[in-house]
Amino acid sequence: MAELNRTVLYDLHVSLKAKMVPFAGYEMPVQYSLGVMKEHLHTRSAAGLFDVSHMGQVILRPKSGDVADAQRALERLVPVSVLGLKEGRQRYALFTNEKGGILDDLMVAHYGDHLMLVVNAATKHDDITHLTTHLSELCSVEPVNDRALVALQGPAAEAALARLVPGVAEMRFMDVAKFDHEGAELWVSRSGYTGEDGFEISVPNDAAQGFAEALIEMEEVAPIGLGARDSLRLEAGLCLYGSDIDTTTTPVEAALEWAIQKVRRTGGARAGGFPGDTRILNDLAEGTARRRVGLLPEGRAPMRAGTLLFDAEDASEPVGEVTSGAFGPSLERPVSMGYVPTPLSDAGTKLWGEVRGKRLPVAVADMPFRPATYKR
Amino acid sequence: MKYTEEHEWLRLEGDTVVVGITEHAAEQLGDLVFVELPDVGTTVAKDDEVVVIESVKAASDILAPIDGEIVEVNEALPENPQLVNEDPTGDGWFFKLKIEDKSVLDEFMDEEAYNAFIE
């Protein structure tokens, strides 16, 4: 196995007694001394600080100097209205392939003269190659290697961050802005991946540890590991790339059609023109054979990724499969998501999941399991 | 108290043995979220899978450390699996086994040997 990378906050994690595990080529904290359950609940009741420096930060800079050229260029790779993204705003997007499958999910932010992309850790090298291959005539593709990325999430996130950076209190959900903090330029977005209000903050490597420590020293902020990050995003109904979405799932199968603005759909001014457009536009018009749904097991046994789903207790063939599942600490019950045939995708539909050879009842449920608390 | 290499503790109470997992095991597993206990009255053989536990990370089995009959289970655990993390050697016990011959406990580690084992 290749040697694992470390983020610039590695020493801080170790000093905070984190349990470190390999994740997407990095040694990352899965939990700290609080443990997954308490870390999850702390994020929902106060504020949690996450190191997400393993994710890819990529600048897309237009060679013409006109950012609209970069926006138009990126639209070739995503079924999303990038041109409709205004300065100071961020939007969720998907890289698709020729078959309509999902290569990655990402955030795109408009910083005036350039775009800033945040992509998944495991896919970042492929994403950069993909961007370079298709866009380098029009844009310079600049991987950002000199910055850490942290997320501060939870109802106390605004108060905590505003103590260091007062301007962030003015931001709304999905706003982005740059701030100076003790001479370091911070790139801040009001977003995250927990269903909570909060921020993601890109901070220069040499300022990252001091910045993270200043937050952790605050009463309401605790460091949170990948374990709680997973249960938080699951309760929020958010997809994990590589589990819930991948190259074999299309955006409509994954119930992500909300990310495809009208202008990119059939009849829109910039309809199609992205990889897999034929399949994806057809999916939008005709529907798909299967859908990603929320699943609530009736008992206490978690139904984890790989659990087969059946439409009857004695059915011989499965109809679907769980792609993510865990105990949801805020809901105090197990929660899952997975793919089922569209006719079985309505909330309330009763299915069975096979756990350790036993068929246990599970109901299709609306997501998010817990309403998001974004500051819109 | 005696200890197994599977990180269980065994405590003799009259002619029954109380079984739980050690603090070290509870810490390694992380927060428990699910416990499935055997039926009282079940006769088990050493190494039978008698309890299913799931932590936030994964599922695992608790094996019967010795032959015997399950005479009591900790009814509080299915509703509150976290008891195992909070008090693994007390309120977090799993089941009680009735045994014929107390000398079967002699083969297991004492506390000193167990501490050396997990070093």
Image (spheres, coloured by chain):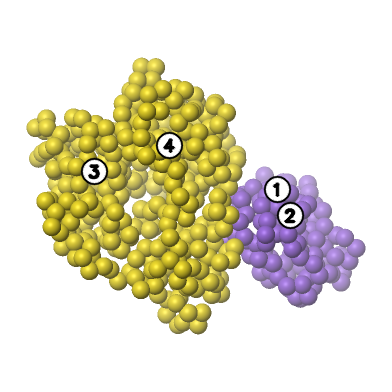
Mark 4 or 3: in front is 4
Q: Amino acid at mark 4?
A: Gly
The chain under label 2 reads B
Quarter of the figure with residue A253? bottom left
Q: Are marks 1 and 3 on the same chain?
A: no
Q: Amino acid at mark 3?
A: Ile
Residue sitting at 75 percent across and 57 percent down? B93
Sequence-wise first label, 4 or 3: 3
State whether residue A204 is above or below residue B76: above
Mark-to-mark CA distance, 1 and 4: 31 Å
Colour yellow belongs to chain: A
Q: Are marks 1 and 3 in contact (CB under 8 Å)?
A: no
The numbered dot on residue A198 is 4
Q: Which residue is mark 1?
A: B86
Q: Which residue is mark 3?
A: A128
Label 1, residues with CA under 10 Å away: few <14, some 14-19, many ≥20: some
Q: Amino acid at mark 1?
A: Glu
